Image (cartoon, rainbow, N blue to C red):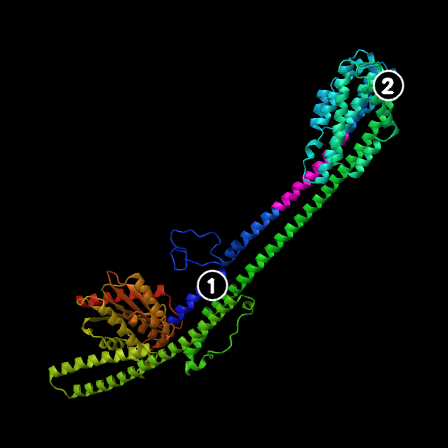
C-alpha cells in the first residue's frame, strides 16, 4: 500500500494548491499542514492567489497613495488658481468702484468748497458709481462693506446738493468707504500664493491701488482748499500725509513691478497734466503758513483727473497682467491635474494588470499541475497498475525506462522553474510508483502462485491420505480402531476443505469432479462432515431438492464454511441448525444456517456483507484474518453465479442466521416435481420472508414429530 499512500499524499497537496487552499477537512481536525491551534489565518492567506494579492496590494496601495497625494496637490493648485482668477476679477471690479467713488469724492469736495461748475460732472459720476455698485454682484464681504459704509450715501449726496453738508465730514465719509473697499480687496490675501510672478503682480496691484487712492484723495482735498483759497484746520497736515503715503506706495510698487509696468507708471507721471499738477502741489506746499492760494480749482481738478485716470489705466494694465497670469496658472493646473489623473489611472491599470498577470502565471501552472496530479492519481496510475497486474508477462518489462523524456502539460511550460521542478518531481513520483506497483504485482503473483501450488500439493496429499484411510476402514474389524479411523477420516476431510479454501483465496479453485446431481440432504451431510464439531449440527428439515453436479462441491464447501462459523461463535451447548426449503414464489431453493450464539455487531455485519459481495483481490488484502471465511463464501457464491446470494440476519432470541439462495439453474428436476427454471435474481425482502416461513415450517414439523 506504499504506492497509494505516496500518490494520495502528493495528489492531495497538489489538488489543494490548484484549488487555492489546503483543505483541513469538514470535521475541523488539525492536520500537519494546516493552521496551528489557537491561530486564526488571514482570509485568503491560505491560497496562492490570496498571498500574491496581499504581497502585490501593499506596494500598489503605497503607489496609489503617492499618486493620490500628487493628484490632491494638483487639485489644490488648480483650485487655488481658479480662486485667484476669480479674486483678481473681483479686485478689478472693486477698484472700478473705488475709482468712481474717488471721482465723486473730489467733485463733492469741490462743490462744497463753492465751485458750482462741478455739479454737472458730479451728476454723471454719481450714475457711474451706482452702476458700479450694481455690478458688484452678491459677494458677501463686499456687500457687507457697502451696506455698512455706504448706507448714508444718498443722504450725503442730498446734503451736498443742498450745501448743508460739512466739507471735512463728507470727505471723511468717502475716504472711509474707499479704505473699507480697499481693505476687503481679496488681492491682499491672494498675494501670499506660491507663484512668484503672480505674487509680485498682486503686490504691485495692491500698492498701485494705495498710490492711486493717495493721488485721488489729494485731488479731492486740494480741490476744496483751492475752492476756498487757503488751508483751514488740519487740511495741510492731511495734505502732507497723503503725499507721503503716495510716495511710499509708489516706491513699494517699483520694487515688485515689472519693467513694462514701471515704464507705464513713469509715462503716467511724465505727461503735461502731471507736471502741471506737480506745480499746483508745489504751490500748495508753500502755503503751509495759511496764506492765500490763488489757484484755479477747475484746472487743478482737470489735470489731477487726467493723472488719476492714467494711474487707473496703469492699474487696469497690471490687473490684466495678473489676471492673465492667473488664467495661465489655472489652465496649467487644470492640464496638470488631468495629466496626473490620466497617469494615476494608467499606473493603477498597469499595476493591476501586472498583478493579475503575476497571479495567473503562478496559479494557472499550479492548477494545471493539480489537474495532472488528479489524472495520475485517478486514471494513469490505476490504469497502469491494472495493466501490470493483468499482464501475463514480467511486469517490469512493461515500465518505461527511467531516463525516458517526460511529456509535460503545455500549460506547465509557461510556469516558473520551481513549478517545472515540481512537475518533474510528479513524473518521478509516477515512475517510482509504477516501479513499486510492478514489484508488488510480481510479489503478489508469486505469492498467489506459491499459495496455489502449496494448496494443490496439500490437496493431493489429503486426497491420497483419504484414499489410504478409506482402504484401512474397509479392512479394519475392531470397532475401537474403526472409530479412530473415522475420526482420522473426518480430520482429513477438514484438511481437504482448508486446502480448497486456500485455492479459492488464491483464485485457483477448480471444483471437485462430480458428474451426477446430488440430493440436497446429501449436500448438507457432506458439508457437516467437513466441520470439526459435527455432533452439534442439527439438520432440522431439508425439503427434497436436487443440486446439479458441477455445483455440488461448491455448495457443500460454502455450507461448511457457514456451519463452521456458526459453531465457532456459539456456546458449546447450543446446536447449529440447518434448514432447507423451496421458495416457489421466486423459484429458488434456500439453505439456512441458524446459530444462537453471540451474534455480530452492525459494523461487523456490514463488513461481512461487503466481503460476501466482493470477490476481488483487494478484498483479500484488506480483510482481517477472522473474516477470511466470509471472503471464501463470497468467492464461492460469485463462482456459482450472480443469482446466488448469501445474506446475514439476526436470529430471533440472539445469534446469527445465514441464508444461501440458489437459483433454479443450479437445481435439477426432482422425481414427481417440475423442473426449476428461474433466472431472475430474488429480492432481499422476499428471501427474508421465505427464510422466516421456511424456518417456521421446519420448526412446526420438528415439533409434530416429537409429539408423535
Where residue 398 appears, as percent x and y from the top left, is: 45, 80
Q: Look at the image and give the residue range highlighted in magenta.
A: 69-93
User: On the rendered structure, is 426 left or right of 560?
Assistant: right
Residue corresponding to mark 2: 297
Quarter occupied by residue 442 = bottom left
User: On the rendered structure, is 701 left or right of 251?
Assistant: left
Residue 692 visible in the picture: no
Front position in the image: 265 or 526 = 265
- Give the prevailing secondary structure in the magenta stretch: helix
Residue, far top: 164
Which residue appears at 70% of the width and 36% of the height? 83
Give the mark toward the camera: 2 or 1: 2
Where residue 693 appears, as percent x and y from the top left, is: 29, 64
Which residue appears at 27% of the width and 66% of the height? 657
Q: Does residue 706 sit above or below 140 in this rendering?
A: below
Front position in the image: 464 or 30 = 30
Quarter occupied by residue 484 = bottom left
Residue 195 - label: none
**Which is more N-terminal, label 1 or label 2?**
1
Q: Count residues near mark 1 (Cα–Cα under 10 Å), then give few for <14, some for 14-19, many for 20+.
A: many
Q: Are marks 2 and 1 in contact (CB under 8 Å)?
A: no
Where residue 524 appears, as percent x and y from the top left, is: 26, 75
Residue 660: in magenta span: no
User: On the rendered structure, is 701 left or right of 375?
Assistant: left
Residue corresponding to mark 1: 15
Residue 223 visible in the picture: yes
Amino acid at each position: 500500500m506504499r504506492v497509494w499512500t505516496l500518490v494520495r499524499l502528493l495528489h492531495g497537496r497538489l489538488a489543494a494548491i490548484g484549488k487555492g487552499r489546503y483543505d483541513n477537512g469538514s470535521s475541523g481536525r488539525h492536520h500537519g499542514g494546516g493552521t496551528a491551534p489557537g491561530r486564526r489565518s488571514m482570509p485568503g492567506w491560505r491560497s496562492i492567489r490570496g498571498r500574491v494579492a496581499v504581497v502585490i496590494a501593499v506596494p500598489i496601495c503605497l503607489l496609489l497613495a503617492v499618486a493620490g497625494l500628487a493628484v490632491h496637490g494638483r487639485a489644490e493648485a488648480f483650485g487655488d488658481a481658479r480662486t485667484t482668477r476669480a479674486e483678481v476679477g473681483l479686485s478689478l471690479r472693486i477698484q472700478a468702484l473705488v475709482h468712481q467713488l474717488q471721482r465723486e469724492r473730489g467733485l463733492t469736495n469741490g462743490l462744497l468748497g463753492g465751485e458750482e461748475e462741478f455739479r454737472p460732472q458730479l451728476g454723471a459720476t454719481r450714475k457711474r458709481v451706482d452702476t458700479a455698485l450694481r455690478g458688484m454682484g452678491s459677494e458677501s464681504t463686499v456687500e457687507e462693506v457697502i451696506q455698512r459704509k455706504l448706507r448714508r450715501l444718498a443722504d450725503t449726496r442730498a446734503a451736498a446738493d443742498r450745501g448743508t453738508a460739512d466739507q471735512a465730514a463728507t470727505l471723511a465719509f468717502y475716504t472711509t468707504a474707499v479704505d473699507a473697499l480697499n481693505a476687503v480687496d481679496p488681492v491682499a490675501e491672494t498675494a501670499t500664493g506660491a507663484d512668484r510672478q503672480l505674487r509680485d503682480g498682486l503686490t504691485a496691484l495692491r500698492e498701485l491701488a494705495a498710490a492711486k487712492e493717495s493721488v485721488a484723495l489729494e485731488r479731492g482735498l486740494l480741490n476744496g482748499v483751492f475752492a476756498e483759497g487757503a488751508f483751514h484746520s488740519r487740511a495741510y497736515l492731511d495734505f502732507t500725509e497723503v503725499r507721503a503715503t503716495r510716495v511710499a506706495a509708489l516706491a513699494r510698487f517699483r520694487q515688485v513691478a515689472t519693467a513694462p509696468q514701471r515704464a507705464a507708471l513713469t509715462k503716467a507721471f511724465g505727461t503735461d497734466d502731471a507736471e502741471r499738477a506737480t506745480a499746483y502741489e508745489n504751490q500748495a506746499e508753500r502755503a503751509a503758513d495759511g496764506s492765500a492760494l490763488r489757484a484755479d480749482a477747475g484746472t487743478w481738478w482737470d489735470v489731477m483727473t487726467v493723472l488719476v485716470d492714467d494711474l487707473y489705466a496703469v492699474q487696469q494694465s497690471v490687473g490684466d497682467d495678473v489676471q492673465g497670469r492667473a488664467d495661465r496658472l489655472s489652465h496649467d493646473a487644470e492640464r496638470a491635474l488631468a495629466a496626473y489623473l490620466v497617469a494615476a489611472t494608467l499606473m493603477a491599470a498597469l499595476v493591476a494588470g501586472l498583478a493579475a498577470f503575476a497571479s495567473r502565471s503562478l496559479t494557472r501552472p499550479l492548477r494545471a499541475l493539480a489537474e495532472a496530479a488528479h489524472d495520475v492519481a485517478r486514471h494513469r496510475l490505476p490504469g497502469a497498475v491494472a495493466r501490470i497486474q493483468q499482464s501475463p508477462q514480467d511486469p517490469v518489462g512493461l515500465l518505461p525506462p527511467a531516463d525516458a523524456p517526460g511529456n509535460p502539460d503545455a500549460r506547465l511550460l509557461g510556469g516558473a522553474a520551481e513549478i517545472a521542478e515540481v512537475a518533474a518531481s510528479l513524473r518521478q513520483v509516477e515512475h517510482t510508483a509504477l516501479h513499486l506497483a510492478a514489484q508488488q504485482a510480481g510479489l503478489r503473483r508469486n505469492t498467489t502462485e506459491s499459495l496455489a501450488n502449496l494448496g494443490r500439493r496439500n490437496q493431493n496429499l489429503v486426497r491420497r491420505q483419504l484414499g489410504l484411510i478409506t482402504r484401512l476402514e474397509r479392512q479394519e474389524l475392531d470397532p475401537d480402531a474403526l472409530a479412530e479411523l473415522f475420526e482420522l477420516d473426518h480430520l482429513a476431510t477438514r484438511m481437504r476443505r482448508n486446502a480448497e479454501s486456500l485455492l479459492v483465496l488464491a483464485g485457483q479453485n477448480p471444483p471437485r469432479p462430480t458428474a451426477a446431481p446430488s440430493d440436497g440432504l446429501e449436500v448438507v451431510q457432506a458439508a457437516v462432515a467437513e466441520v470439526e464439531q459435527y455432533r452439534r449440527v442439527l439438520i432440522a428439515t431439508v425439503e427434497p431438492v436436487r443440486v446439479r453436479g458441477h455445483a455440488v462441491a461448491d455448495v457443500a464447501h460454502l455450507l461448511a464454511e457457514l456451519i463452521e462459523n456458526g459453531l465457532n461463535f456459539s456456546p458449546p451447548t447450543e446446536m447449529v441448525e440447518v434448514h432447507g426449503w423451496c421458495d416457489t414464489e421466486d423459484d429458488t431453493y434456500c439453505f439456512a444456517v441458524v446459530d444462537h450464539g453471540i451474534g455480530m455487531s452492525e459494523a461487523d455485519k456490514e463488513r461481512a456483507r461487503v466481503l460476501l459481495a466482493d470477490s476481488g483481490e483487494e478484498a483479500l488484502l484488506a480483510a482481517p484474518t477472522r473474516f477470511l471465511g466470509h471472503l471464501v463464501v463470497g468467492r464461492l457464491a460469485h463462482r456459482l453465479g450472480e443469482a446466488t446470494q448469501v445474506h446475514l440476519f439476526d436470529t430471533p432470541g440472539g445469534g446469527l442466521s445465514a441464508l444461501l439462495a440458489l437459483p433454479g439453474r443450479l437445481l435439477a428436476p426432482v422425481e414427481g416435481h417440475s423442473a426449476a427454471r428461474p433466472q431472475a435474481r430474488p429480492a432481499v425482502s422476499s428471501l427474508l420472508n421465505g427464510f422466516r416461513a421456511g424456518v417456521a415450517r421446519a420448526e412446526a414439523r420438528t415439533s409434530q414429530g416429537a409429539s408423535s
